[in-house]
Image (cartoon, rainbow, N blue to C red):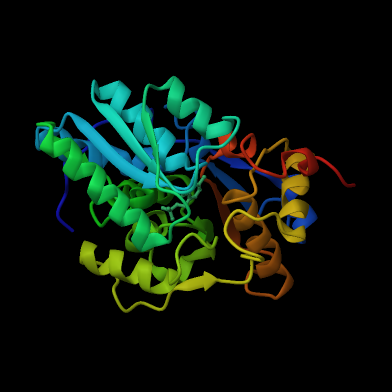
Amino acid sequence: MPTARRITLSTWPTPLEPAPRLSAALGLRPDDLWVKRDDLSGLAGGGNKIRKLEYTCAAAVDAGAEVLVTSGAPQSNHARLTAAAAARLGLSAVLVLEGDPPSSERGNLLLDRLLGAEVTWAGEVDAAGLAAAVTAQVEQLRGSGRRVYEVPFGGSSPLAAHGYLDAADELRQQAPGLAHLVVALGSGGTMAGLVAGLGAERVLGVHTGAVEQPTETVQELLAGMGAGAGASLRIRQDQVGAGYGTLTDAVHHALRLAARTEGLVLEPTYTGRALAGLVAAVADGDIAPGSQVVFLHSGGLPGLFGHPELARLAEGS
Ligand SMILES: Cc1ncc(COP(=O)(O)O)c(C=O)c1O
């Protein structure tokens, strides 16, 4: 794969930590489960999007951009980290978000403003409607003479996925015996980079409902990277429940389990779903005791504080 230019936006490698109490609670052996702490990557609250932005931002800077434009859900972690990367690089950020302005700003949205991003609302739109709103915004900015770089939805492109080739390199050093790597699948770039770096058989993606066709989405990214296209991907689609961002019982259980066994805080939209997927994979035998499992903590804590069911999250025994 050709190497691409990267701008460093955090301190690497992120740690790999043992999680013996969570491992035992899942029905694995205490030394089976490890957590790759990409939530500890150091820009503006951290998370997986930083690795992808290191490549996208390098391309934006090389293209002479002044403004980064991107899109997402109202509580998009990617939008928050694009705003942070823009601030770090002396650029402006315009975030085109789905929906209408909320009555109070919480979580990522609050940080978007603090980081100096301009937020525009696309209304209740589908993926095509959101893309059209981004195009209109980009044309308007270009019409007023600004040099714009469009960062794709969720930050995922074949170029951006190189960030997770870097993570795969770290994991090869940190976990040479890795058998299963469990990761939330949103816009797909994180899983695509990991599959390109580690092989499809070791990566289990847990679909979050962020895109309509998760398998095709990851396959297209792989094809764009010139890697692993046609490989048989391991993707669980059983954790979406009533839709993207909704709090299912399995996710609620997973959040409490991680918090109460390891002091590890997940959130309902991505990492909580990924852990619910791991619980289901152990229950149905896809992942068996006695093999090394790494759970990717991909960040997203601000999203917890923006979740509509925040008050319910800590309830239950
Ligand atoms: C915290 C978190 N984890 C995982 C993902 C999924 O990453 P990707 O969009 O690369 O599939 C996202 C995407 O928004 C995220 O915010």
Q: Can you see residue 192? A: no
Q: Is residue 292 above or below residue 312?
A: below
Residue 313 occupies quadrant: top right
Residue 54 occupies quadrant: top left
x then y, percent, for residue 52:
33, 44
x then y, percent, for residue 254:
73, 52
In the rendered structure, the answer to whether residue 135 lies left or right of residue 267 reads left
Q: In the depicted view, which residue is nearer to us: 252 or 138?
A: 138
Residue drawn 24% across and 69% down? 223
Residue drawn 45% across and 69% down? 212
Q: In the depicted view, which residue is nearer to us: 160 or 213?
A: 213
Could you tell me which quadrant the N terminus lies in? Answer: bottom left
> Number of marks in the image?
0
In the rendered structure, the answer to whether residue 126 lies left or right of residue 2 reads right
Q: In the depicted view, which residue is nearer to us: 17 or 316?
A: 316
Residue drawn 23% across and 36% down? 57
Q: Is residue 90 above or below residue 201?
A: above
x then y, percent, for residue 307:
64, 42
Residue drawn 49% across and 48% down? 99
Q: Is residue 135 above or below residue 143?
A: below
Q: Can you see residue 214? A: yes
x then y, percent, for residue 304:
63, 38
Residue located farthest toward the right when viewing the structure as drawn? 317
In the rendered structure, the answer to whether residue 112 lies left or right of residue 313 reads left
Q: Is residue 281 above or below residue 143?
A: below
